[in-house]
Structure formats: structure tokens, C-alpha cells
Amino acid sequence: MEVDAVKEQINLIQSNTKRHVEAIPLLLPHNLSDLFAAVGWRKPEFYFQSEVRAGISSFALANQDLINKRLQLLTADLSSGEWVKKYGNIRNLTEIDLGYRFIRATLDN
């Protein structure tokens, strides 16, 4: 099921181009090397590295006080085992769908 915003974009592209448009999920691998917001989906410890955060616009452009507070909460959750209790099962996954999509438009035949 696509998010309404994606459906809206698909409808807009289809109506303006008369092409068949589809959204294809981009499954993120566990060993993702590109540094964007979801890089730490399986290893949240990545977000403690300032050079990692600096390369992710949502971290680099955000209020740094807020980022630091959230990192403190993450530290506490990892130290207490709360993160593992809530999310530890994702460490067993090799890929995950976090909502990223490729949009493909093709001619109808």
C-alpha cells in the first residue's frame, strides 16, 4: 500500500505524461554503504559518529540541540537494553522496506 503522497505523485505523472507509472520499493540492505538517514536502521550506533551525521542532511540541517537530546535518549536505550527489547529483531533482517521508492514510468502498449 503506497502512501497518499506517492499515489498523488503517480497520478500527477500519469495524467501529464499518459504513461503507466508505478512505485517500486527500494529495499535497504543491512550493509548499506551510502550515508543517508536510514543508514543505521540495523545499527543505530552509526548515528553517534559525527562524520556520519554530517553527511546526512536531515541531521546536518536540524537543530543540533534536539539531535543531541535524541542521541542521549538513544544512548540510554542502547545501554539499558530497551532498544534491543523493542527493535532488536531487525538485526536479524538482511533488508528492510523503510518507504523509499523508485518511480518508473513506461509507455502503455
Image: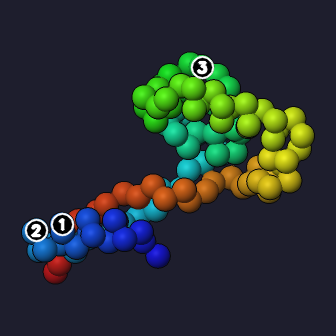
| Residue wearing tag 1 | 13
Is 17 placed above or below 44 here? Answer: below
Q: Quadrant of residue 67?
A: top right
Label 2: which secondary element: helix
Q: Quadrant of residue 44?
A: top right
Is 29 placed above or below 104 here? Answer: above
Q: Nearer the viewer, residue 40 or 106?
A: 40
Q: Nearer the viewer, mark 3 or mark 2?
A: 3
One can see residue 56 in this view = no
Mark 1–mark 3 distance (CA, rounded to whole Å): 38 Å
Question: Residue 71, how many percent across, how many down?
Answer: 68, 31
Q: Residue at x 56, y 43 (%)?
A: 38
Q: Nearer the viewer, residue 48 or 92?
A: 48
Quick one: label 1, few (<14), some, or many (20+) residues within 10 Å? some
Q: Are marks 2 and 1 in contact (CB under 8 Å)?
A: yes
Residue type marked 3: Ser
Residue type marked 2: Thr
Residue type marked 1: Ile
Q: Nearer the viewer, residue 88 or 96?
A: 88
Quadrant (top left, top right, bottom left, bottom right) of the C terminus: bottom left
Quick one: label 3, few (<14), some, or many (20+) residues within 10 Å? few
Label 1: which secondary element: helix
Residue 27 left/right relative to 68: left
Q: Quadrant of residue 90?
A: bottom right
| Residue wearing tag 3 | 50
Is 56 placed above or below 28 here? Answer: above
| Residue wearing tag 2 | 17
Q: Residue at x 89, y 40 (%)?
A: 80
Mark 3–mark 2 distance (CA, rounded to whole Å): 43 Å
Quick one: label 2, few (<14), some, or many (20+) residues within 10 Å? few
One can see residue 26 in this view = yes
Question: Residue 34, how many percent across, how many down?
Answer: 50, 34
